[in-house]
């Protein structure tokens, strides 16, 4: 079973001027076949997200005409603009809309659905999108729009801006992408207004960014991020926020957008496996965006010097929004306009600079969460998620049903690159059921093809085992498919277990259910509004790789050793402690590592030596 939304890396889409001209040519032909006598360019099946879609198609037609004059387009653009002004601008309050600060303002807004009171909650983002489509039409329609119509569109855009920032609460859905999009709309509008009016709109947009977005950033994995639907990051909307930050910087030149965009880009780089797989989010876990991410990933990938374009997107939305029949939809058209206008090239080389929350070399990668527990392990094209036992999730030693991976104190990290090997040593203080503080030292070493994970801690009473991951997905190149298998070898006995309880709070990797579907089923709210991250946290048990302690470990230690990825022959690492009893030497087939005293060096930092 293939994951429906994790498809090809976004940087694999051709982005030459000729490729974009071909995309626009296809849009033009679809639009000219579709346009109604009254100028409507909406897809016939469009019901929701409708308030901006016809005008979005209009902007693409105007851009196509700007790039290569087409006598068929002038009439289509003018008719469709008038259709939007006549049929898709609302000035009477939508019954039931809960986020107004000013009733009966008479200011224009766009509706999420056309029927009064049917689904008013989506009107704020729909109006943001309509604002962006409007300013784009004015900017790229210079060869078509006459002065009177251009002025009317400018006044409409100013009305949208005022409705968003005066008549309603700002960012009522707590969605960073929508909020930054509104700021971008204000910045672009300001460029089209003269004198103090334009200056006022620009200053208001910048103050909203500083006071309502930047001041409320959320910390995750060492980065400050614009919050998204109540969480720090969402796989669908996070990269869209990155695109908005790129456009904000392009339009305004303000350093703050570059700084925040680079921080978000580095965060994305650390989250992503080499193969571009990632999961998690407060709105969607695996429904990745497509073309809406390209601008930000390309622009900031170039700025930070890393190939974040490896991010897997939904190739059905590789160029523009589409309906189930494949027909183009004008929703999000502004992003395609900006993407075409931007000349930044993809940065395709991976960054070799060590990052705290990422270990990455060749085809192997480990993305770590804020507690420095692996969030995703990738080796030999297989992706492993944290397994669950007794409502505890992660990678780490388990004793009597208790998972030792949550830190009780500062987690320290040491990165090393030697002789073609890349390594990360994580020293983590933990407390078990006995309330005894122990230091777990987890060593991750990769040669770019295989990953060795060695976990050492003070010897435990009983029969501990290592929770070594949940095999979840595998890379087929163009697609990612579900799997319950992986090439894993352990120095001790290795088991792949599946939950005997098949209830909603147990996840069996052999089922066709995706992680996202399982997470939504456990969320407090219905699909589309529930928080899958929160839902997944309610998981009691899952498929899990369980590794017994490695034989031959020193008497005072339990050592677990696991190898992910291909490897011929048995896996028989050797271990010995130093004369002081504080260091641990690990010898595997590809390396020798010496792990220092858990207390660290004179500055309490981890000590590690490594040789091939």
Image (tube, rainbow, N blue to C red):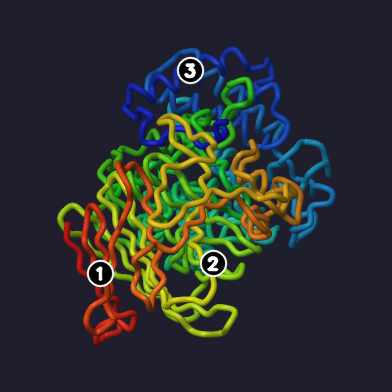
Q: CA distance from mark 1 to mark 2?
A: 23 Å
Residue that carries the numbered disc 2 in the rendered image? 398
| Disc nearer the start of the sequence (3/1) | 3
Instruction: State which tag comes first along the sequence, 2 or 3.
Output: 3
Q: In the image, is residue 486 above or below residue 440?
A: above
Q: Which residue is mark 3?
A: 26
Camera-side residue: 374 or 487?
Answer: 487
Q: Secondary structure at mark 2?
A: strand
Q: Residues within 10 Å of mark 2 (few under 14, many from 20)?
A: some
Among all residues in the image, which is located at the extreme bottom? Answer: 602
Q: Residue at x 32, y 67 (%)?
A: 425
Give the residue at x 44% y 47%.
243
Q: Which is closer to the viewer, label 3 or label 1? A: 1
Q: CA distance from mark 3 to mark 1?
A: 62 Å
* Residue at the image position 42 percent from the left and 68 percent from the top: 222
Q: Are marks 2 and 3 in contact (CB under 8 Å)?
A: no
Instruction: Report whether 582 appears left or right of 125.
Output: left
Q: Position of residue 357 (x, y in %)?
A: 38, 62
Q: Crowding near pointer 1: few (<14 within 10 Å), some, many (20+)? A: some
Q: Please tell me which residue lies in front, 144 or 163.
A: 163
Residue 162 seen by the camera = no
Q: Earlier in the sequence, mark 1 or mark 2?
A: 2
Q: Does dot 3 land on a helix, a strand or a loop?
A: helix
Q: Is residue 66 left or right of residue 186?
A: left
Give the residue number, with chain letter if any, for mark 1.
585
């Amino acid at each position: 079973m293939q994951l429906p939304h994790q498809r090809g890396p976004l940087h694999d889409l051709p982005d030459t001027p000729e490729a974009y001209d071909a995309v626009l040519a296809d849009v033009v032909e679809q639009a000219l076949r579709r346009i109604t006598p009254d100028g409507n360019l909406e897809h016939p099946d469009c019901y929701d997200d409708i308030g901006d879609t016809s005008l979005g198609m209009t902007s693409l037609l105007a851009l196509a005409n700007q790039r290569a004059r087409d006598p068929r387009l002038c009439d289509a653009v003018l008719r469709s603009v008038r259709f939007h002004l006549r049929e898709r601008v609302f000035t009477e309050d939508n019954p039931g809309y809960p986020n107004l600060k000013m009733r009966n303002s008479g200011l224009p807004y766009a509706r999420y659905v056309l029927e009064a009171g049917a689904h008013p909650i989506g009107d704020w983002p729909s109006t943001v999108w309509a604002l962006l489509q409007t300013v784009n039409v004015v900017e790229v329609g210079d060869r078509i729009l006459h002065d009177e119509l251009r002025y009317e569109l400018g006044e409409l855009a100013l009305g949208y801006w005022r409705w968003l920032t005066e008549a309603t609460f700002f960012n009522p859905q707590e969605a960073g992408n929508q909020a930054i999009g509104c700021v971008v709309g204000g910045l672009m509008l300001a460029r089209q207004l003269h004198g103090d009016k334009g200056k006022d709109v620009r200053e208001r947009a910048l103050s909203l960014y500083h006071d309502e977005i930047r001041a409320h950033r959320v910390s995750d994995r060492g980065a400050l991020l614009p919050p998204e639907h109540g969480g720090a990051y969402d796989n669908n909307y996070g990269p869209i926020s990155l695109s908005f930050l790129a456009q904000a910087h392009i339009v305004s030149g303000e350093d703050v957008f570059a700084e925040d965009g680079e921080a978000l880009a580095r965060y994305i780089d650390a989250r992503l496996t080499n193969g571009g797989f990632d999961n998690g989010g407060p709105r969607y876990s695996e429904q990745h965006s497509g073309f809406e991410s390209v601008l930000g990933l390309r622009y900031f990938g170039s700025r930070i010097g890393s190939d974040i374009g490896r991010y897997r997107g939904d190739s059905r939305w590789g160029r523009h929004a589409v309906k189930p029949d494949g027909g183009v939809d004008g929703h999000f058209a502004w992003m395609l306009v900006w993407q075409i206008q931007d000349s930044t090239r993809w940065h395709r080389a991976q960054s070799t600079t060590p990052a705290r929350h990422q270990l990455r070399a060749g085809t192997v990668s480990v993305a770590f969460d804020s507690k420095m527990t692996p969030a995703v392990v990738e080796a030999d094209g297989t992706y492993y998620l944290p397994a669950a036992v007794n409502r505890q999730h992660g990678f780490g030693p388990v004793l009597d049903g208790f998972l030792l991976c949550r830190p009780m104190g500062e987690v320290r990290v040491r990165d090393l690159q030697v002789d073609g090997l890349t390594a990360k040593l994580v020293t983590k203080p933990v407390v078990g059921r006995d309330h005894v503080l122990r230091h777990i030292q987890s060593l991750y070493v990769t040669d770019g093809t295989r990953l060795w994970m060695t976990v050492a801690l003070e010897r435990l009473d009983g029969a501990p085992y290592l929770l070594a991951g949940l095999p979840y997905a595998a890379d087929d190149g163009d697609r990612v498919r579900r799997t319950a298998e992986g090439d894993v070898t352990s120095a001790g006995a290795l088991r792949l277990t599946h939950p005997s309880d098949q209830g909603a709070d147990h996840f069996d990797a052999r089922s066709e259910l995706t992680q996202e579907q399982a997470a939504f089923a456990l969320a407090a709210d219905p699909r589309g509004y529930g928080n899958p991250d929160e839902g997944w946290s309610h998981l009691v048990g899952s498929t899990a790789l369980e590794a017994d302690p490695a034989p031959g470990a020193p008497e005072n230690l339990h050592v677990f050793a696991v190898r992910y990825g291909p490897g011929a022959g048995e896996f028989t690492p050797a271990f010995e402690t130093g004369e002081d009893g504080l260091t641990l030497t690990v010898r595997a087939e590809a390396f020798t590592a010496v792990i220092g005293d858990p207390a660290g060096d004179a500055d309490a930092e981890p000590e590690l030596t490594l040789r091939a």
